[in-house]
Image: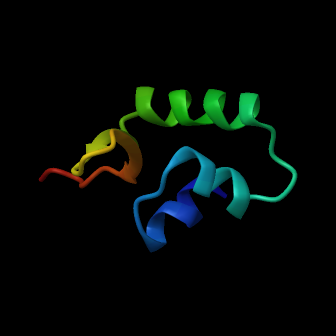
Amino acid sequence: MIIVALVQRPARFSELAKSISGITDGILADRLRELMAARLVERQLADGPATAVLYRLTVPKD
């Protein structure tokens, strides 16, 4: 469900938590770490005055 949410667009942790019903913050954090370890998702700092972290799908490299 995380990947489905991220296919639409990059999202903040809180946006992901709201879009996936029934998931706890702890489980979401664990799954995001697993997806990052598998290099399917990456964590990116968003531009702007306030520091924000976005999660997005990685781009496959040929």
Number of marks present in the image shown: 0
Q: Relative to 30, is 46 above or below? A: below
Task: Work out which residue is located at the far front of the displayed protein and give it.
Answer: 49
- Image location of residue 47, percent across then percent down: 21, 50
Q: Could you tell whether 11 is left or right of 21 in the image?
A: left
Residue 26 falls in image quadrant? top right
Look at the image and name its color scheme: rainbow
Q: Relative to 1, is 13 above or below? A: above
* Residue drawn 48% across the image and 61% down it: 6
Residue 4 falls in image quadrant? bottom right
Q: Relative to 10, is 58 above or below? A: above
Task: Work out which residue is located at the far left of the displayed protein and give it.
Answer: 62
* Residue drawn 82% across the image and 59% down it: 21
- Image location of residue 16, percent across then percent down: 61, 54
**The N terminus lies in quadrant:** bottom right
- Image location of residue 5, percent across then percent down: 57, 64
* Residue drawn 54% across the image and 29% down it: 34
Task: Work out which residue is located at the far right of the displayed protein and give it.
Answer: 22
- Image location of residue 50, percent across then percent down: 33, 43
Residue 31 falls in image quadrant? top right
Q: Could you tell whether 14 is left or right of 44 in the image?
A: right
* Residue drawn 52% across the image and 27% down it: 33
